[in-house]
Image: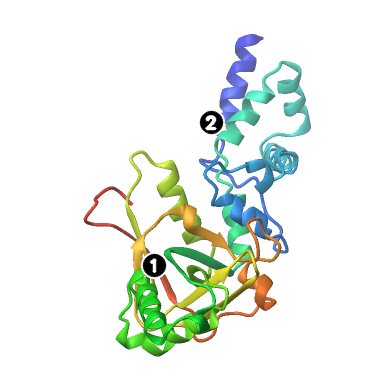
């Protein structure tokens, strides 16, 4: 009987497809802002991204559906009685190609993001001389890697209107998945590849998260730099760390066309992207 049961289970397993999609996400489901930021963390708390009980329940339902397609109730009862049905269940689960997180990212759509640059603007620019503010504007342009002469007016405006100063960011709307893919490459590969990120004609933002103030302008040129996931934030209301730009503006989108965002391998550093 033992040999018969083993042979029956092996026969069923041999009839399985190479892969299954056991978990389907409802089209109305989306990731929350907190879930998106958690995906960028050094240590992702997956229980905060996907409810483990929900995931287990949906996967079990998918397995049940596959079994029903393969076996009638008597055959399932026979394997269950002889403790072999679990082997078939495990084999089905091993072939599961579901990507609920990826599905949720695609359903969530475009979000507002900030990437912090290594620069900050000083507060109370009206107290400075024109020369001092010009120097500050040039420093911000240099930090962003854009040509100052092409953006002199915009950078002067940025310094003059960022009353309380603050950190310098690139601000843009974009999809979650290319960012998450870049984060995974840098955080979870050994050795980690050196990635470059860039935006064409983006918005630059000076944001004071303590006082809840800032200013944003669009610039011309390409902002390009090494990618550091710790500098990446979703800009959303009531997030940890202080005021976001969304808190300050009430959710206004950046002006102008959406900047082109790209991730590429740093050829000077090598590695596999």
Task: Give the image location of residue 196, x and y in percent.
Answer: 34, 60
* Sooner in the amino-acid sequence: mark 1 or mark 2: 2
Could you tell whether 204 is left or right of 99 in the image? Answer: left
Mark yes or no: residue 217 visible: no
Above or below, 266 against 59 in this view is: below
- Single out the residue that lies furthest toward the left: 268
Residue 18 at x, y = what percent?
A: 51, 40
Write the residue at 48% across / 52% down. Answer: 230
Tell me if mark 1 has few (under 14), some (14-19) or many (20+) residues whose alpha carbon lies within 10 angstroms of its own.
few
Q: Nearer the viewer, residue 72 or 44?
A: 44
- For residue 112, which quarter of the picture? bottom right
Q: Which residue is mark 1?
A: 262
Q: Nearer the viewer, residue 171 or 55?
A: 171
Looking at the image, which residue is at 63% across and 67% down? 244
Residue 4 is situated, as x and y percent measured from the top left of the image, at 62, 14
Q: Name the residue that disc number 2 marks.
A: 14
Q: Is residue 263 left or right of residue 109?
A: left
Label 1, label 2: how far apart the Cα atoms are: 44 Å
């Amino acid at each position: 009987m033992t040999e018969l049961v083993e042979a029956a289970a092996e026969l069923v397993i041999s009839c399985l497809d190479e892969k299954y999609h056991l978990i389907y996400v409802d089209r109305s489901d989306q990731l929350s802002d907190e879930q998106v930021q958690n995906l960028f963390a050094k240590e992702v708390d997956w229980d905060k991204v996907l409810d483990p009980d929900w995931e287990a329940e949906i996967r079990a339902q998918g397995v049940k559906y596959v079994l029903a397609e393969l076996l009638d109730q008597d055959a399932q009862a026979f394997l269950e009685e002889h403790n072999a049905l679990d082997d078939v269940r495990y084999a089905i689960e091993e072939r599961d190609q579901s990507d609920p997180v990826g599905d949720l990212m695609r359903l969530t759509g475009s979000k507002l993001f900030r990437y912090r640059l290594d620069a900050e603007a000083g507060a109370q620019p009206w107290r400075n001389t024109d020369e001092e503010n010009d120097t500050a504007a040039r420093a911000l342009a240099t930090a962003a890697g854009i040509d100052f002469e092409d953006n002199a007016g915009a950078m002067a405006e940025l310094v003059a209107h960022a009353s309380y100063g603050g950190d310098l960011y690139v601000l843009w709307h974009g999809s979650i998945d290319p960012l998450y893919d870049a984060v995974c490459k840098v955080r979870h590969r050994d050795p980690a590849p050196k990635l470059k990120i860039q935006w064409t004609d983006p918005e630059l933002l000076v944001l004071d998260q303590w006082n809840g103030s800032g200013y944003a302008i669009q610039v011309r040129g390409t902002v390009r730099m090494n990618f550091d996931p710790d500098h990446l934030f979703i800009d959303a209301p009531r997030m940890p760390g202080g005021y976001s730009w969304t808190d300050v503006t009430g959710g206004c989108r950046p002006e102008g066309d959406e900047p082109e965002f790209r991730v590429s391998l740093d050829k000077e550093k090598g590695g596999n992207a």
